Image: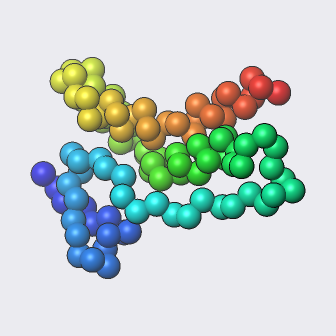
Amino acid sequence: MKEVKDKSLQKKGTKRRNSHYHVAAKRKAVPAVQPEERGLVPYDPLQLYLFEIKQYNLLTREEEKELAIRVKEHKDKEAAYRLVTSNLRLVVKIGMEFHR
């Protein structure tokens, strides 16, 4: 298997393998909502969700095609997970178009 250095982990010298798609455990601070901007809840669930899905990298066409083949031919659950998580932003975009 080919090893790839993750840019966020590069300073530490940590490597991860292509076959292991994990999100870094570190989470960035969630932007605070000012009290005058709040509604019924102290945070905006949609903004929080959008912030969380940014951690998943987008795929190139070649990566997407390779993962789709692995899912179809080998029933690879890890490839299916990566396909789904990498397309979450697309799902939100399409949902917002129907919302309008």
Q: Position of residue 59 (x, y in %)?
A: 43, 45
| Along the viewing direction, whichever of 58 and 38 lies nearer the viewer | 38
Whether residue 69 is visible here, answered yes or no, is no
Instruction: Give the residue furthest to the left.
Output: 1
Query: Image quarter for residue 11?
Result: bottom left
Q: Residue at x 74, y 57 (%)?
A: 33
| Along the viewing direction, whichever of 18 and 20 lies nearer the viewer | 20
Instruction: Give the residue furthest to the bottom.
Output: 11
Query: Image quarter for residue 63?
Result: top left
Q: Residue at x 25, y 29 (%)?
A: 77
Query: Image quarter for residue 61?
Result: top left
Q: Going by the image, does 21 lie left or right of 17?
A: right
Whether residue 7 is visible here, answered yes or no, is yes
Q: Going by the image, does 87 lie left or right of 25?
A: right
Q: Residue at x 58, y 35 (%)?
A: 90
- Residue 29 lies, with reference to residue 100, above or below; the image says below
Q: Position of residue 73 (x, y in %)?
A: 21, 21
In which quadrant is the C terminus drawn?
Answer: top right
